[in-house]
Amino acid sequence: MKKSLIIAIALVAMVAFVGGVVAQEKKAPAPAPAAPAPEKAKTEKAKAPKAMKASGAVAAYEAGKMIKVKGSKDKEWAFDIAPDAKIKGEPKQGAKVTVMYKKDGDKMVATSISVAAAKKPKAPKEEKK
């Protein structure tokens, strides 16, 4: 009797395990997770300052050192000029300029300065008779 009881329990256990395996839903293998970006790249990206733009008339200019630009509504910005800054044109006092800059702490550093071409006055049209 003990032998038949042990066989019965073994059969019930085997059916329970096999039933559980058969009842499982077949799933597609999960895609491999993307390799995480190196931490150094993340911190450098976060530290890289965003380029910004300011436009207006030159209030003061010291070649290779600084430029002050007066914008609309009496706003005035002072920029240090980066050693590798690209300067297109000749920034004279009163000239219209566009300054691309980045913030370095509490300073604004100009990375490029573009002087707008001076507009030529239109010549009066001659009337044909």
Image: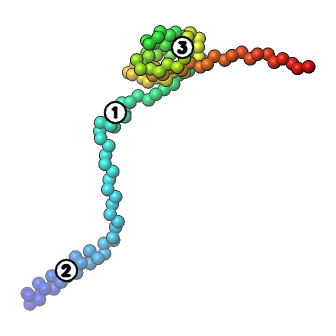
Give the residue at mark 3.
Answer: 91
The kind of residue tagged 3 is Pro
Secondary structure of the residue carrying numbered label 1:
helix
Q: Measured along the vertical axis of the image, is residue 15 above or below residue 112?
A: below
Whole-percent x, y for residue 104 in the image: 39, 22
What's the residue at 52%, 20% (across, down)? Answer: 88
Is 108 left, or right, of 72 in this rendering? left
Could you say which quadrant of the image residue 39 lies in? top left
Give the residue at mark 2.
Answer: 14
Q: Residues within 10 Å of mark 2 (few under 14, many from 20)?
A: few
Task: Say whether residue 97 is visible.
Answer: no
The quarter of the picture where the C terminus appears is top right
Secondary structure of the residue carrying numbered label 2:
helix
Depth order, front residue of 77/6: 77
Between the residue at mark 3 and the residue at mark 2, the CA separation in whole angstroms equals 89 Å
Give whichever of discs 3 and 2 has the lower sequence position.
2
Between the residue at mark 1 and the residue at mark 3, the CA separation in whole angstroms equals 33 Å
The kind of residue tagged 1 is Glu
Say how the picture is coloured.
rainbow
Q: Which labelled disc corresponds to residue 44?
A: 1
* Residue at the extreme left of the image, as rendered: 2
Give whichever of discs 2 and 1 has the lower sequence position.
2
Q: Residues within 10 Å of mark 3 (few under 14, many from 20)?
A: many
User: Which of the two marks, 2 or 1, is nearer to us in this view?
Assistant: 1
